[in-house]
Amino acid sequence: MPEMPGVPRDVENVDMENCVLKQKKEGRDCMGVFAHISKKLQTEKLHFSLLDPDEVDLDTVSDIASTIEKAGSDAIMVGGSSSAVGAVNDKTIQSIKTGCSLPVIIFPGGWGAVSPYADAIFFMSILNSRNPYFITKAQALGAKAVKQFGLEPIPMGYLVVEPGETVGWIAEADVIPRKKPQIAAAYALAAQYMGMDLVYLEAGSGASSPVPADMITMVKHTVDIPVVVGGGIRTGRQAASVVKAGADIVVTGTVIETTDNAKDVVSTLVKAVKEEL
Ligand code: 1GP
């Protein structure tokens, strides 16, 4: 049988210090990331901060991660639609881990984003893509590395909602029209029935407005799995509306990457998500 593709680097060449595989071998891993998330969701809504290796400065990302943790965010997602792969991705994740103890979850733009230094990976399928590469093939290419690196895969159905922004274009998605919440609900239920642990409603990074409230509500009422919502959420008021509509986990990226005051921005978003505003 020919060698399967899909391992972006030789696992023997990985710098093992602090990588997740070493921790597992030493029995240092405690509760898994999804178990941790699920436990927290029993009592509160969660805020995840997204950092794109293409958009953050390696010299400051450790400080940003520390600020994010102190501001009360629940996890850091690392990824982006473009070139967040290989060494840039690894170094960004390692720097983040020196700055905070939050779970670091890869939010892959492709199979090359698999890194041994994160705690988990959203093992996601873009269910409304027209291209099977984004539904199952990239996942097949990345699966072996996820296993070799000892990363925790968190199966997730990912749905791109209008306007979809860059990810909608790259992933060749049939973006879900904003006025058709029933389509999002149908896909979300399919995600649940296919065994996914989470469903993510994505308006696209930098979208002019978040996923519509009635769409979030219909999805929340349709599925039993946690609903993640991201794209275009910039203010506490928007984050609070998204939670009120039914989101369990709120993701913000651009607003954190572009502010001079991450502390205040993340604190406000977290307070809004935790319904403390
Ligand atoms: C993008 O949902 C995330 O994948 C975050 O979007 O950058 O607009 O916050 P923003």
Image (spheres, rainbow, N blue to C red):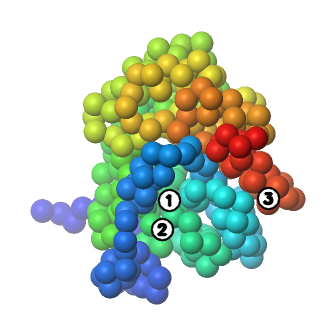
Residue closest to the eye, 254 or 142? 254
Q: Earlier in the sequence, mark 3 or mark 1?
A: 1
Quadrant location of residue 152? bottom left
Q: Badges 3 and 2: C-beta atoms under 8 Å apart? A: no
User: Image point 65% across, 75% down: which residue?
Assistant: 99
In the displayed structure, 160 sits above or below 176; it is below
In the displayed structure, 11 sits above or below 259; it is below
Q: Badges 1 and 2: C-beta atoms under 8 Å apart? A: yes
User: Image point 72% across, 60% down: which residue?
Assistant: 71
User: Image point 33% across, 27% down: which residue?
Assistant: 190
> Pointer 1: residues within 10 angstroms few (<14), some, or many (20+)?
many
Amino acid at the residue labelled 3 = Ala
Amino acid at the residue labelled 1 = Ile
Q: Is residue 16 left or right of residue 204?
A: left
Q: Earlier in the sequence, mark 1 or mark 2?
A: 1
Mark 3 or 1, which is nearer the eye? 3
Quadrant location of residue 157? top left
Instruction: Kindly identify which residue carries mark 1.
Output: 105
Instruction: Kindly identify which residue carries mark 2.
Output: 118
How far is mark 1 from mark 2, CA to CA? 6 Å
Identify the mark at residue 262; answer none if there is no mark: 3
In the displayed structure, 55 sits above or below 233; it is below
**Which residue occupies the extreme right position in the image?**
260
Amino acid at the residue labelled 2 = Ala
How far is mark 3 from mark 2, CA to CA? 22 Å
